[in-house]
Image: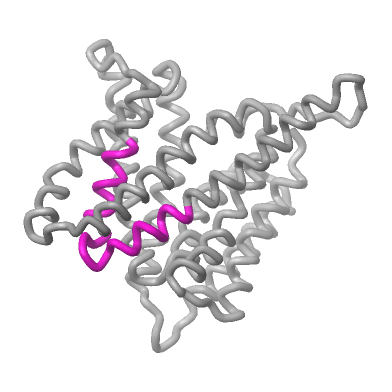
């Protein structure tokens, strides 16, 4: 994704005899993006069903294992050839990757999927707005900030720990983007991402074993955890690899803003997590801030 955001948009307004083929590919890319987002949020919701047995830590550990297996198969990293200059950003990326998923899933457990994903989405949104000097983007930042204030307004039921974990996940996602840029420049292909996922999975191995010993997983909980790994890690990653070949970076970044809405809807359908009008307004503000910034950005 970070590399994709730096690509120029390829769409043009001039019709050509062969213009129908690129248009069809672009529509297919948009459909794939929607499927990827829906898969990601559905996987998180299904993983939450296993929280009573495995807890967020056990589910995240399983997700890390699945992600490592998929990325190892795709990236095939040559770990022995890595230099220290390549290893240190990989190790940081692994730490950020694991922390991001753990804080997000713990936040989901405490405040619900929709609010947790909305707070996490502030990470990439901040990266996008911080690189701009436009007054419009400053206004977008204010709009997103207003949404966060609404989400975190004092109430008897407000879970500030859950909110804080969502913001930690946002910081991790922003760091993940920046570190991915470094890894992408220093290590070819998907080798860096595969190495980071592998290190993260190995770090979670003791935790996964401890959870399994203390709380022996049921078949249903284990199946939910594996489904979370496949739907939230494997399928979105592979879908994004295909999408970024046919969809302009601006469109890709714009469509990312749909994720908080998808998370809220999936959380309502799968987990029965309902949101009030203020929460929906806050989610809308964060989504609108990203959409406005993306739509008015010249590439």
Q: Residue at x 49, y 79 (%)?
A: 153
Q: Main secondary structure of the magenta part?
A: helix
Total number of numbered discs in the rendering: 0
10 relative to 61 in the view: left or right: right
Quadrant location of residue 147?
Answer: bottom right
Please state the extent of the stretch shown in magenta in the rendering: 41-67
Q: Can residue 296 be seen in this view?
A: yes
Query: Which residue appears farthest toward the left when viewing the image?
Result: 213
| Spot occupied by residue 168 in the image (x, y as percentages of width and height) | 37, 57
| Spot occupied by residue 182 in the image (x, y as percentages of width and height) | 43, 27
| Spot occupied by residue 40 in the image (x, y as percentages of width and height) | 47, 49
Q: Residue at x 24, y 47 (%)?
A: 61
**Front-most of 143 and 73?**
73
Q: Residue at x 60, y 42 (%)?
A: 33
Colour pattern of the rendering: one colour
In the image, is residue 228 part of the stretch drawn in magenta? no
Q: Residue at x 53, y 73 (%)?
A: 149
Question: Taking 51 as reference, is 259 above or below it?
Answer: above
Query: Which residue appears farthest toward the front when viewing the image?
Result: 219
Question: Taking 276 as reference, is 296 above or below it?
Answer: above
Quadrant location of residue 7?
Answer: top right
171 relative to 29 in the view: left or right: left
Question: Taking 175 as reference, is 78 above or below it?
Answer: above
Quadrant of the frame with the C terminus: top right
């Amino acid at each position: 994704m970070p590399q994709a955001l730096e690509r120029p948009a390829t769409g043009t307004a001039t019709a050509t005899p062969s213009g129908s083929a690129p248009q069809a590919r672009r529509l297919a890319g948009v459909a794939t993006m929607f499927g990827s987002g829906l898969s990601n949020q559905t996987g998180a919701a299904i993983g939450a069903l296993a929280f009573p047995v495995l807890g967020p830590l056990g589910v995240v550990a399983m997700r890390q294992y699945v992600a490592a297996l998929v990325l190892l198969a795709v990236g095939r990293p040559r770990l022995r050839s890595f230099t220290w200059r390549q290893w240190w950003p990989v190790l940081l990326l692994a730490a950020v990757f694991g922390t991001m998923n753990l804080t997000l899933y713990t936040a989901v457990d405490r405040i619900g999927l929709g609010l947790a994903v909305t707070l996490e989405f502030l990470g990439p949104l901040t990266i996008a707005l911080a690189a701009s000097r436009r007054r419009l983007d400053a206004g977008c930042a204010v709009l997103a900030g207003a949404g966060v204030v609404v989400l975190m307004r004092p109430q008897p039921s407000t879970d500030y720990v859950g909110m804080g974990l969502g913001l930690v996940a946002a910081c991790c996602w922003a760091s993940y983007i920046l570190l991915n840029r470094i890894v992408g420049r220093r290590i070819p292909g998907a080798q860096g991402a595969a190495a980071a996922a592998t290190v993260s999975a190995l770090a979670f191995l003791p935790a996964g074993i401890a959870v399994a010993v203390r709380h022996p997983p049921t078949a249903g909980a284990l199946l939910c955890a594996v489904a979370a790994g496949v739907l939230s890690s494997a399928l979105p990653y592979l879908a994004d690899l295909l999408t970024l070949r046919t969809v302009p970076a601006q469109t890709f970044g714009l469509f990312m803003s749909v994720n908080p809405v998808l998370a809220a809807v999936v959380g309502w359908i799968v987990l029965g997590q309902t949101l009030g009008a203020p929460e929906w307004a806050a989610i809308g503000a964060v989504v609108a801030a990203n959409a406005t910034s993306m739509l008015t950005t010249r590439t």
